[in-house]
Amino acid sequence: MTETAPMTGGAATREAALLEQRTPPRHTPQLAGRAPLGRLPGGLLRTARPRQWVKNVLVIAAPAAAGQLFSRHALTQLTLVFLLFTACAAAVYLINDARDADADRAHPVKRHRPVAAGHVPVPVAYAVGAVLGVLAPAAAAWLVSPAVAALLTAYLGMQLAYCVSLKHVLVVDLVVVTTGFLMRAMVGGLALGIPLSRWFLITTGFGALFMVSAKRYSEAVQMAEKAGATRALLTEYTTGYLRFVWQLAAGVAVLGYCLWALEEGGVPHTSVLPWRQLSVVAFILAILRYAVFADRGTAGEPEDVVLRDRALALIGLVWLGMYGAAVANW
């Protein structure tokens, strides 16, 4: 058996150099100031949370309820409002992630966010967020109406205050998130000059509070089962309190919708059935079905709950058909 002779000093040095050249450098996402340019556009898009844009479809709520949705002017204005509201929401996400970058890097899940991972430099996130936050209300004032610009400005101010401090205040955090949904539902009516019914505002507001508090309740239940909280404030809420909130909100939303349907649901002679009043049944069934997931502690994002449950999606389509028939006077 032959033995391999040990390498001399010079040969060992050359061999080590060759191995170093062949070994790829390790990626260090914490170097937030050196983001590859190729990853920047995708990182900015991911930070803008495309999955959350579906919430902005609520801008059609008031025009749809008033039966003023399908004119060319309405569709043009609502598309523009949707884009402007999306820009405002993206501005908030960018500034929030830039502000929380250091804390997110220590979080097992949030450390993968583009800003925390170094794909989007913190100054760039601040700059793009600021530009979007200024341009969106300015464009709304020029292209839509001053009322829409004022609402978008109020939304930005409220959400930035939430990112800085309000998310740490009990109850106020629920109110701020709920108001964000309500503003989405209002802005379409403001853009088209549609008067907003008090029952529409009550139903929409408390319906949003129902889903927001149900989500918080689900997070609190899951936090009790697993180590680690996704929201620090959840440790100060009790599951009993959050259950009380979503049950109260569901009751008020149902009451508001019933009064709204009965008040505005006069049956024209051209209607085959009193569709608006009948839609109350579908609305209540949808609330009861959603409450099943809230009670189990599995009511996460509202769009995820609706899309993964076929029964709830079917009830929603039935309600939509009934209400559409009422608006069209069928």
Image (cartoon, rainbow, N blue to C red):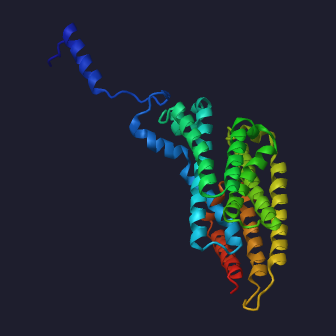
Q: Nearer the viewer, residue 3 or 267?
A: 267
Q: Position of residue 175 (x, y in %)?
A: 78, 49
Q: Nearer the viewer, residue 166 or 288?
A: 166
Q: Is residue 30 left or right of residue 270?
A: left
Asked where in the image residue 306 lies, by quadrant, the reply is: bottom right
Residue 71 location, x and y as percent? 59, 74
In what quadrant of the picture does the N terminus appear?
top left
Q: Nearer the viewer, residue 155 or 9?
A: 155
Residue at 61%, 70% in the rendered image: 310
Residue 98 visible, this angle: yes
User: Tag count in the figure?
Assistant: 0
Asked where in the image residue 72 lies, by quadrant, the reply is: bottom right
The residue under the point 67% across, 75% down is 320
Q: Position of residue 271 (x, y in %)?
A: 73, 89
How far across and down, in percent of the image, does residue 50 sit? 54, 52
Image side of residue 179 versus residue 263, left or right: left
Image point 57% across, 31% down: which residue?
Answer: 105
Residue at the left extreme of this rendering: 2
As drawn, is 260 to the left or to the right of 144? Answer: right
In front: 111, or 83?
83
Residue that extends furthest to the front in the rendered view of this protein: 142
The answer to whether residue 232 is above or below residue 178 is: above
Q: Is residue 109 visible?
A: no
**For the point 84% across and 49% down, which residue is it?**
241
- The quadrant of the picture occupied by the C terminus is bottom right
